Image (tube, rainbow, N blue to C red):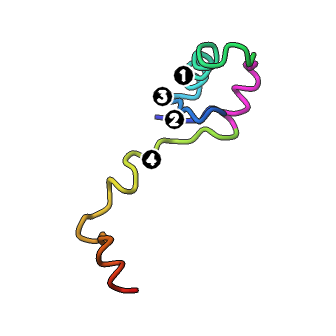
Amino acid sequence: MRLVYCFCGCCIRGTTDTDLFHQNRNHQNHAHPTHQTTDAQIWAVIKANAHKECGRLYHEEANPDHQTSAHERTKRH
């Protein structure tokens, strides 16, 4: 899965760059109808900023045994 972020902060996902373009165009048409984003602008954003989705977020992968509680952090200081 590939992803890119809209200027509004929305994460847009697609299986390929072409799919990402269509998803982004759909988002622009519905979320920002007065912005008049061109196809060339969308492709430029995809070319410059699209990347492969990493999977799980860091905190989801973190081992609970290695996390420090707020109480433990306070005891050290």
Question: Circle 3 sits in a helix, a strand or a loop, which is it?
Answer: loop
Residue type indicated by callout 1? Asp
Region of the chain picked out in magenta, as a range: 37-47
> Looking at the image, is 21 positioned above or below residue 70?
above
Answer with left or right where residue 68 lies relative to residue 40. Answer: left
The answer to which of marks 4 and 2 sits earlier in the sequence is 2
Task: Report the Cα–Cα distance between label 1 and label 4.
Answer: 18 Å
Residue type indicated by callout 4? Cys
Q: Which residue of the protein is positioned furthest toward the left in this rendering?
A: 65
Residue beneath disc 4: 54
Task: Report the Cα–Cα distance between label 4 and label 2.
Answer: 9 Å
Q: Was residue 20 drawn as part of the magenta stretch in this picture?
A: no
Q: Residue 35: x, y in percent?
A: 74, 19
- Pointers 2 and 3 in contact (C-beta within 8 Å): yes
Give the label on residue 19, or none. 1
Within-10-Å neighbours for mark 2: few <14, some 14–19, many 20+: some
Give the label on residue 15, or none. 3
Answer with left or right where residue 4 lies relative to residue 40. Answer: left
Q: Residue 43: x, y in percent?
A: 70, 27
> Looking at the image, is 16 positioned above or below residue 31?
below
- Pointers 2 and 1 in contact (C-beta within 8 Å): yes
What secondary structure is the magenta-colored segment mainly?
A: helix
The answer to which of marks 2 and 3 sits earlier in the sequence is 2
Question: Circle 2 sits in a helix, a strand or a loop, which is it?
Answer: strand
